[in-house]
Amino acid sequence: MAWGPPGPVSLWMEGSGEVTDRPYSRIYHELAEDYPEVYDGPLLADYTRLLVAADQAYPTRARWAGYTTRKAITRLEQIGLATLDGARYTLRGIDKERAERSAKASRAARSRHASSTATSSATSSATSSPRSTATTVARQLPRRDETRQDETRRDNGRATDEDAVDDYFRLTGRAPKATVMAWLDRLVTDHGDDALRSAMAGAWQEDPNVTDFLGRVEARCVSASRQSARASKERAASSELEHQRRELVLMESMPEEQRTANMQRLGSMLADSGLLAK
């Protein structure tokens, strides 16, 4: 156990009515019983000076020169109160003592912080207006359609917290008003977040004019949607033709009667689908 690792302590300043933090050195009563040679002799002064120097240098090791003599530090090492390391030294128990003090200080700081936070939160809740409270809650809630947008982004292999609203602010330099938010929300619902953001980027690159920006964005979204629908229809038709081609190949290996019947059936199917004039 350490006899005297110094450190900060709250002291009552007599007459001032205040508590102040001042450095101190602690020497335990056991020193007198366990090491009477030090406590009752001149080594007590050497030990006290070494104690203060060790604390000032902590956590590094202090130099003993200037605080004691070679004879005194050697004797303190012989009786177990000091450990020499060349020109430096450490005192018995100082590491443990400082670690315990540090832990206590940390616990006290956490306790004060928790108490301060709770008091501040209670005061803020008591003094905040209903409008500010509603605004705070609204900011904590996810925007409408946010879950669907996040799923779309994950499906496309890119995770991001940004959306069309962020793009609007970044491109135009303006915070979107309620009407703009409603417009963007409708476009997201109709065309999807990725298609909308792509249209916004293209429209702004073509003409960085905010006046008719969203109108041009919507026109691009509608055009892209029509092109996508047309391409999807063409792919479906191409797939159907490929299927019919394979049917024809199979029919060539069939008996004549079966092939004739299948050809008639195929002609009827093509006519019904509008791919063959009746």
Image (cartoon, helix red, strand yellow):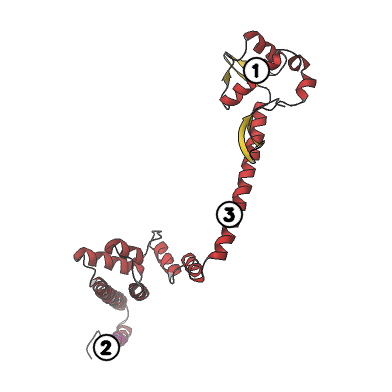
Q: CA distance from mark 3 to mark 2?
A: 77 Å
Q: Which numbered disc, 2 or 1, marks the residue closer to the eye? A: 1
Say what amino acid the circle numbered 3 marks. Thr
Which of the labelled discs sits on residue 267, or is there none? Answer: none
Q: Residue at x 80, y 21 (%)?
A: 33
- Looking at marks 3 and 2 on the same chain, the residue that comes earlier in the sequence is marked by 3
Q: Residues within 10 Å of mark 2 (few under 14, many from 20)?
A: few
x and y percent of residue 201 in the render?
26, 64
Q: Quadrant of the N terminus?
A: top right
Which SS type dominates the magenta stretch?
helix
Q: Residue at x 64, y 44 (%)?
A: 108
Q: Residue furthest left?
A: 207
State which region is magenta.
Answer: 265-274
Discs 3, 2 touching: Cβ within 8 Å: no
Q: CA distance from mark 3 to mark 1?
A: 45 Å
Does dot 3 land on a helix, a strand or a loop? helix
- Looking at marks 3 and 1 on the same chain, the residue that comes earlier in the sequence is marked by 1
Does dot 1 land on a helix, a strand or a loop? strand
Q: Quadrant of residue 236?
A: bottom left
Q: Residue at x 61, y 37 (%)?
A: 20
| Circle 1 residue | 83
Does dot 2 land on a helix, a strand or a loop? helix
Q: Is residue 28 above or below residue 63?
A: below
x and y percent of residue 110 in the render?
61, 46
Which of the labelled discs sits on residue 271, or is there none? Answer: 2
- Looking at marks 2 and 1 on the same chain, the residue that comes earlier in the sequence is marked by 1
Q: Residue at x 62, y 41 (%)?
A: 106
Let me know if residue 268 is in the magenta part: yes
x and y percent of residue 23 in the render?
61, 30
Q: Residues within 10 Å of mark 1 (few under 14, many from 20)?
A: some
Let me know if residue 94 is in the magenta part: no
Which of the labelled discs sits on residue 117, or is there none? Answer: 3
